Image (tube, grey):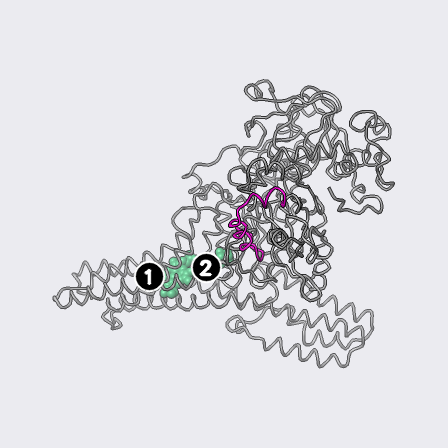
Amino acid sequence: MFIRRRLYSVGLTLAVLALLVYWTYYQKSALGRVSFGTGYVLLAAIFFLALYNIHKKLPTLPWGSSSDWLQAHIYVALGTALVFGLHVDWRFPTGILDLTLATLYSATFLSGIVGLVWSRTIPARLARVSEEVIYERIPMLRSQLCDRAQEAVLETVRSSGSTTLGEFYSRRMHGFFERTRGLGYFLRPNNRLRRRLLAELTEVSRYLSPPEQVTCEQLFAMVRRRDDLDFHAAMQWRLKAWLFLHIGLTYPLLAVACLHGLLAHWFGGGLL
Amino acid sequence: MPQTEIIANRPQRWDVPFGDAMRDSDVDQLLQIEPFRSIDPERFPSALPLRAILKNDTRVNHYQDGGIIVREGDYGSSAFLVVQGKARVVLAGLDEEVLGRQPESKPGFLKSMFRQWRNPRLPEVRSHVASRSELIGNDSQQVADLAQTRVFLQDIPRVLENTRSVVLHPGEIFGELAALTRSPRTATVLADGETVLLEIRWQGLRDLMRRTDALRRHIERLYRENSLRVHLRETPLLSHLPAEHLEAVAEATLFETYGDFQWHETFHSSSSSHSGSSGKATDAVVAEPLIAEEGSPCEGLVLVRSGFARLSHGFGHGHRTVAYLGKGQVFGLAEVIGTSTKNEPVPMSHSLRGLGYVDVLRIPQAVLEKHVFPNVSQQLLDEVAAEHAFFRPEHHGSQAQVETPLLEFLVEQRFINGQQAMLVDLDRCTRCDDCIRACAATHDNNPRFIRHGFRHGSLMVAHACMHCVDPVCMIGCPTGAIGRDRTTGVVQINDPTCIGCSTCAESCPYDNIRMVEIRDSSGAIVIDDSTKQPIHKATKCDLCTDLPTGPACQSACPHDALVRMDLGNLGELSEWVNR
Ligand code: HEM
Ligand code: SF4
């Protein structure tokens, strides 16, 4: 079903673009001007792309499903690349306003591409993690886990009297359970720390008394769980953050694009 | 009906009293009146004496003039015997509003679209909150137990003016069919003057019926007179049978029930102990009541009347679920045809077991041989045989391919009950929560589901009302506030008449109904005058029935990750899973 939809949309997009290209070459060969034509098409497309934000804000209106809108959004957005190229005649502009505008457009476009790739690849990676968690609940789950780990270790120290595990825990693991991961992890989640802690735990388990061994087994599971939570936190954060940036770029882009259009009319195209 | 429950000791249900305890003198009195006077106590086993059934499975209810005893469309699990006074059965449909069911007013098209601008900021705000006394009327008999609250009809003569009704007198029973077959009540019954009724819970009724021929015959006659013929006509082999032969088949059809009517009460505990290991799953399958066994000679056709049954096939040391059958589906067609053509019993190719509660009809082979096979063309026979050579119920679609583990998961968790289950494809879901926001926007800022739930691989069944085929939540709502829309099948809670007793929330096996504290328009939590406690209301997904776009969650999902689906339709499911 998705494949058929993709074929259809790609076909339609290419057909529309072909028409547009044909029109510009026809105009140019007749020594006409294409800048206003492509400019208006581009502006309209950007308005349409931005309208998706409004659509999401009004989910009770019967104006198409969000999934249809996203499909239209993606193909129109991809199409704008060609229109943009035609509009600037495949040269990056130099004027300060035009440069700003072109940069804003490119940034929005790129953020869209990157976001789309993330939106299509991250969910499956999250689904492979054993537990599904709601983003807002992660801090609570984390602190519960931290309390449980600490509780288990303290209890073992109390009941068994031996402190090997206790010392190892406070030296190597407590920080892991208590603190959130650094920015580096959020940007590039990886399992280095998880692997290292599990290896150290395996190493220390040789010196543990039987009751400590039992707690140690629990700690293995807790480290994995905590790392899974962190992975969810980082990935879900990324899925939210890119969109935030994408929308954040959209409105300045719109504003500058409108200004640019106005000026173009004022100065009779002198700026182009 | 076969005895599917082996009675070793005192039935467990008796640990929970059915209303106020019956005194011995009450039981003595009951034994003096019909139908109990003519029941032979000798026919009851020592662990289940007639006296104990009356003592533990019945209660005496008093109604004032106009008290609603049962409401058309409600689901209930008990029958009633008129002891004193009269009960009036209203045959023509009463106005839903009179019964306290219709939502106050539905917002119009435009209003519902733009309502999110008027949504209150705080959760669970209600513009008008009726007090309990307003709802329950002049209930002189204050009951501590909210679940026993009764609703009264005011101004009966006017209400009944243009409707046909029948009066029941002492000794007559009503409500038995709905209680035994889990079907909605077909009529509303009101107290006509002061009335005393004996309410009998379904287990007690079933036990009485098994040992009382007159009662059993009475109930089976009702069965036959009601929907049996329609049901038979919908069966592939019988759809074109001449009327007189259909009549003969109807007369010879056997009625059987398996499993526990109140399956939802025990389901929670059993499902939480289910760890998903295959050993346990096999035990669970074997524990389910057997309706027909793989390898045993074919004895006739089985039609599912209500509930669900698991179709399984022996595999290694266990059982592999092949499909599940629901209302209207047929088991054993290929075998009965094979038996007839080969002239000797063919072994059954699959086993059929009851899941929760299931109600089946059985047409014996001999009856089919006599009345059906001689009257259908060879062509039809071949067609049906070819279609059912391997199990393939018609509405499952021809290329229904759902992998067995997924099928086991849906059966184990009883999600097969869902007609509008919310499935989330975790491989596509970006966890953006647009679905939650759309739901909140549609429901005064209160999301009515949780984007979390049981998982099978990357498929998640979220906590959202599934608008079940077997809506156990609807059993026992004292005011009828929770009801099923007759045209759309959507289960809805009428907020103004919900008294917050949480019967429905506790019955829902999937934990999809939430009890909430409500606020008035100033934002203050509303306190009940009489109890000084916050007023609660039951809330759940209403499928956005008043939105032109259908469920807001589904249309708000940008990534095609969320769908509302009938899990009884495996064709649809397989299409979605393999898209
Ligand atoms: C170039 C101009 C673009 C503009 C002005 C623009 C604007 C927007 C806006 C306003 C939204 C709505 C976000 C929300 O309210 O949640 C959005 C969402 C989105 N855009 Fe763009 N966009 C552009 C280009 C692109 C491109 C090139 C792609 C990728 C091919 C893209 C992919 C997406 C996706 C996937 C979403 C939805 C994400 C989600 O809901 O999870 N966009 N865009
Ligand atoms: S709207 Fe779709 S993608 Fe977003 S959280 Fe809901 S199900 Fe997931």
Q: Where A247 falls versus B359 (above or below)?
A: below
Residue B146 visible at all:
no
SS label for mark 1: helix
Cβ(mark 1) to ligand 1 < 8 Å? no
Residue range highlighted in magenta: B368-395
Could you tell me what secondary structure mostly forms the magenta stretch?
helix
Q: Quadrant of residue B570?
A: bottom right
Cβ(mark 2) to ligand 2 < 8 Å? yes
Return the x and y of residue A185 as percentages of the image width and height. Answer: 54, 73
Left or right: where B89 falls relative to A98 = right
Q: Where A129 falls versus B42 (above or below)?
A: below
Q: Chain of mark 1?
A: A
* Residue occupied by mark 2: B559
Left or right: where B563 falls relative to B33 = left
Residue B404, which numbered label?
none
Q: Amino acid at mark 2?
A: His
- The reply to whether discs 2 and 1 touch (Cβ–Cβ < 8 Å) is no
Return the x and y of residue B210 as percentages of the image width and height. Answer: 77, 38
Q: Which residue: 13% across, 64% down?
A: A32
Q: Where B508 falls versus B410 (above or below)?
A: above
Residue B395 visible at all:
yes
Q: Residues within 10 Å of mark 2 (few under 14, many from 20)?
A: some
